[in-house]
Image: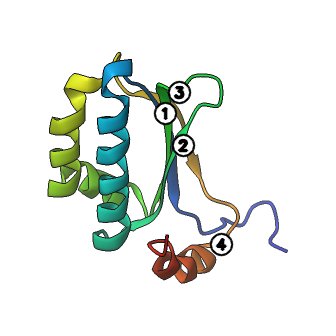
Amino acid sequence: MQGKNQMIESMLAGFFAINVKPEHREAFVEAGVAVAKGVIGGDPGAFQFQMLVDAADPNRFYFFEIYRDEAAGKAHMESEVFRTWWNTVEPMLDQGVETVATMHTVFPSVGGLEAQKAGLSNW
């Protein structure tokens, strides 16, 4: 176990919320799944990209994402996959994107996240 003054290697994580206009829900889900597959399959700095829907509100979605570091998160935002997704879904949104939290990973370890990446696209 590391002492409290030792830095634990970690990755950067974000948790985001998006409200979608009801008439665009199905198209938003389709676009979200496509971007998730594109990010996990084609972005070497992305280690987690989950899309979830609120149990009480079918038009509220959450995204949980983990990137190697801040530079990898920024590269994601500048990628063609993200830009195409954003241009598609922006008119569907009921409001903007809410950043719920920005975090650093603790478990799984960096090595654990790296090891599981290959299996994330196996739906």
Relative side of 94 to 100, left or right: left
Q: Amino acid at mark 1?
A: Phe
Marks 2 & 3, CB-CB < 8 Å contact = no
Marks 3 & 4, CB-CB < 8 Å contact = no
Residue underneath mark 2? 52
**Residue under the point 29% across and 63% down:** 38
Closest to the observer: 70 or 53? 53
Residue underneath mark 3? 58
Closest to the observer: 22 or 86? 22
Q: Element type at marker 2?
A: strand
**Residue under the point 29% across and 37% down:** 27
Q: Amino acid at mark 2?
A: Leu
**Residue under the point 47% across and 81% down:** 118
- The numbered disc on residue 109 is 4
Q: Earlier in the sequence, mark 2 or mark 3?
A: 2
- The numbered disc on residue 84 is none
**Number of residues whose C-alpha sits closer than 10 Å to that of mark 3, classed few (under 14), some (14–19) or many (20 or more):** few
Residue underneath mark 1? 61
**Residue under the point 70% across and 65% down:** 107
Residue 101: x and y in percent read 55, 35
Q: Earlier in the sequence, mark 3 or mark 4?
A: 3
